[in-house]
Each structure stands twice: as structure tokens, then as C-alpha cells.
């Protein structure tokens, strides 16, 4: 029901309770029934202000569901508990939980083959939904970062604001501990971008084969200028050179055979 809402008796504000049907259907939880998550606390009406312990508990449902993960949900929970969002005393961090970033009615993990730009936009959109002041034109929070907006369009916040790992980490670091070393990304073997390049690499292999991964990778090394147009032109020139050498060899072979017959 798009109009489902109620008036908060404390401040008189209308709170929207509707769920986007299409968003839920395409989410990772789309096949679940409502009562699979909304259990004990919601059997009676009116519902309590807070759910009972164990309700809406991600780890309670996913603790044994580690088939598609490089590490378990218990490890993810431990990472989150070390996160600045979990240990901060700031009023804004009060009650911070999995649902603060991952809307259970809309959440869908990134998939291989999804455009990298879209993955970056979705991930950063979650962060900027709370930290919207950082995206303001006159914000000075990322003044040290050259071409700030270009970086934000190509790199996820978590790639710099979490410890280096082969997978997306949930231990969000304080701002002063975030990565500010350009070489961590701009090198032949970038540590920070390994998680994002994994999607790019898999995408290239699925779309164009191993040649795309070896030749058309997006690694950017400091001190070098990379141009996809020049890359393709160089490959064309190399291919023509190989064809000319092969044609020259075949011509010499045919001429040699003709001379022997004469």
C-alpha cells in the first residue's frame, strides 16, 4: 500500500511504512515471506516500539549461509563491531546496524557483469545518503584528493575507508586512518582497487575473453598516461606488422619453390 503510514505521537510527523513492491521483488530477500523476518515482536497489535532481541537479526539468519562468501557472516559481524559506525560516541551513530546501510527490502549485492560505474554509484550512494554534506560543491573534506568528483565516480568509498583486503570489508575506519597513498591505487598491482578490479576482470573475461583482461585492463600506473584509443591503434599496427611479416614469409617460400621447379 503506497499510502501506508502513521503519525508519530511524539512529534506529529507522518512516517511512511510502505514498501516498494518492485524493489522488494528484485532484492535478495524477494522470495521471503514477511513473517520470515518479522516474527515474535509483530504477532500482536499494536506493535512494540522496538523489536525483541533476535528479530531482524541478519547474523541469526545468515550465520550458516556462507556458500557464496569468501568468509563467514560471523567474520562480517566482527568487522562491523570494529567499525567507526559501531564504536563511535557520536549521536548520529546511535543504533547503527546492518539495516542502516543495507535496506533489507531493496538490498541486492553487486553481480559479475554489472557495469563498474553502476556498482560504484550504488555503493557510494549508500554512504552519501548519510554523509550528504561531503558531496556539497564547497566541501573541503577531500581537498587532498585530486579531481575529487572523478575519483568518486570511479572508486567506492569503502575502497579507501576500509583496511586492505581481497573482499569488501565492513570495518569502516575513521577519516584520519583512511588511505591517502596514491600508489595504493595507481600501480600495476593496486592493493586498494583489487576488490573493484575483481568485478572489472570478471566482466572483461565474460564479455571478451582472457585477451581483454591481459590487454585492455584499467590499471593506471603513476607517471604514465593511458589512452584506450592509442592502445587499440597500437594493437592494430602490431597486427598489421605480423600479417606483413607472414605475407613476406609466404611470398619468399612460394618464390623459392618456383625457382626450384624452374
Image: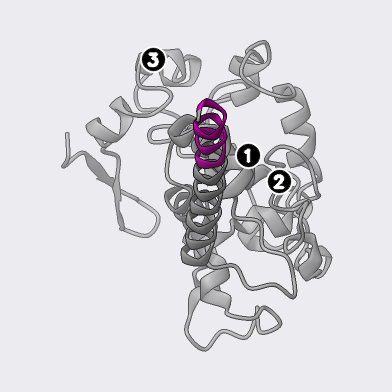
Q: Secondary structure at mark 3?
A: loop
User: CA separation, marks 3 and 1?
Assistant: 30 Å
**Residue at the front extreme?**
262
- Of mark 3 and mark 2, the one earlier in the sequence is 3
Q: Is there any visible trace of residue 199 in the rendered image? A: no
Measured from the top left, where is residue 222 in percent x and y?
Answer: 74, 71
- Of mark 3 and mark 1, the one earlier in the sequence is 3
Q: Secondary structure at mark 2?
A: helix
Residue drawn at (75%, 67%) of the image: 175
Q: Which residue is mark 3?
A: 32
Measured from the top left, where is residue 136 in percent x and y?
Answer: 48, 80
Q: Is residue 254 magenta?
A: yes
Residue drawn at (75%, 38%) of the image: 166
Residue drawn at (49%, 69%) of the image: 132
Q: Which residues are magenta?
A: 251-261
Choose top left, top right, bottom left or bottom right for residue 92: bottom right
Q: Are marks 1 and 2 in contact (CB under 8 Å)?
A: yes
| Placement of 133 over or under 22, stated as above or below | below
Mark 1 nearby-residue class (10 Å; few <14, some 14–19, many ≥20)? some
Q: Are marks 3 and 1 in contact (CB under 8 Å)?
A: no
| Nearest to viewer (mark 3 / mark 1) | 1
Q: Are marks 3 and 2 in contact (CB under 8 Å)?
A: no
Q: Is residue 118 left or right of residue 7?
A: right
Measured from the top left, where is residue 55 in percent x and y?
Answer: 55, 22
Residue situated in front as seen by the camera: 32 or 154: 154
Residue situated in front as seen by the camera: 180 or 204: 204
Q: Which residue is mark 1?
A: 198
Q: Which residue is mark 2?
A: 194
Q: Is residue 248 left or right of residue 97?
A: left
Residue situated in front as seen by the camera: 7 or 107: 107
Measured from the top left, where is residue 43 in percent x and y?
Answer: 40, 15
Amino acid at each position: 500500500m503506497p499510502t501506508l503510514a502513521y503519525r508519530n505521537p511524539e512529534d506529529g510527523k507522518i512516517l511512511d511504512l510502505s514498501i516498494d513492491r518492485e524493489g522488494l521483488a528484485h532484492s535478495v530477500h524477494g522470495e521471503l515471506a514477511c513473517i520470515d523476518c518479522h516474527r515474535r515482536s509483530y504477532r500482536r497489535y499494536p506493535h512494540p516500539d522496538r523489536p525483541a532481541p533476535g528479530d531482524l537479526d541478519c547474523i541469526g539468519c545468515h550465520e550458516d549461509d556462507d556458500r557464496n562468501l569468501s568468509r563467514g557472516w560471523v567474520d562480517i559481524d566482527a568487522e562491523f563491531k570494529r567499525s567507526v559506525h559501531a564504536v563511535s560516541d557520536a549521536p548520529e551513530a546511535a543504533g547503527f546496524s546492518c539495516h542502516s546501510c543495507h535496506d533489507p527490502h531493496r538490498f541486492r549485492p553487486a553481480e559479475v557483469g554489472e557495469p563498474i560505474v553502476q556498482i560504484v554509484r550504488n555503493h557510494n550512494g549508500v554512504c552519501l545518503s548519510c554523509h550528504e554534506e561531503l558531496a556539497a560543491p564547497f566541501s573541503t573534506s577531500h581537498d587532498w584528493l585530486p579531481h575529487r568528483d572523478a575519483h568518486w565516480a570511479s572508486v567506492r568509498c569503502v575502497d579507501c575507508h576500509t583496511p586492505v583486503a581481497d573482499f569488501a570489508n565492513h570495518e569502516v575506519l575513521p577519516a584520519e586512518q583512511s588511505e591517502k597513498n596514491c600508489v595504493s591505487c595507481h600501480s600495476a598491482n593496486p592493493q586498494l582497487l583489487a576488490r573493484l578490479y575483481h568485478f572489472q576482470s570478471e566482466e572483461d573475461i565474460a564479455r571478451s575473453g582472457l585477451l581483454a583482461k591481459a590487454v585492455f585492463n584499467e590499471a593506471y600506473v603513476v607517471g604514465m598516461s593511458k589512452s584506450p584509443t592509442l592502445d587499440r591503434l597500437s594493437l592494430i599496427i602490431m597486427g598489421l606488422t605480423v600479417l606483413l611479416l607472414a605475407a613476406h614469409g609466404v611470398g619468399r617460400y612460394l618464390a623459392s619453390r618456383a625457382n626450384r621447379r624452374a
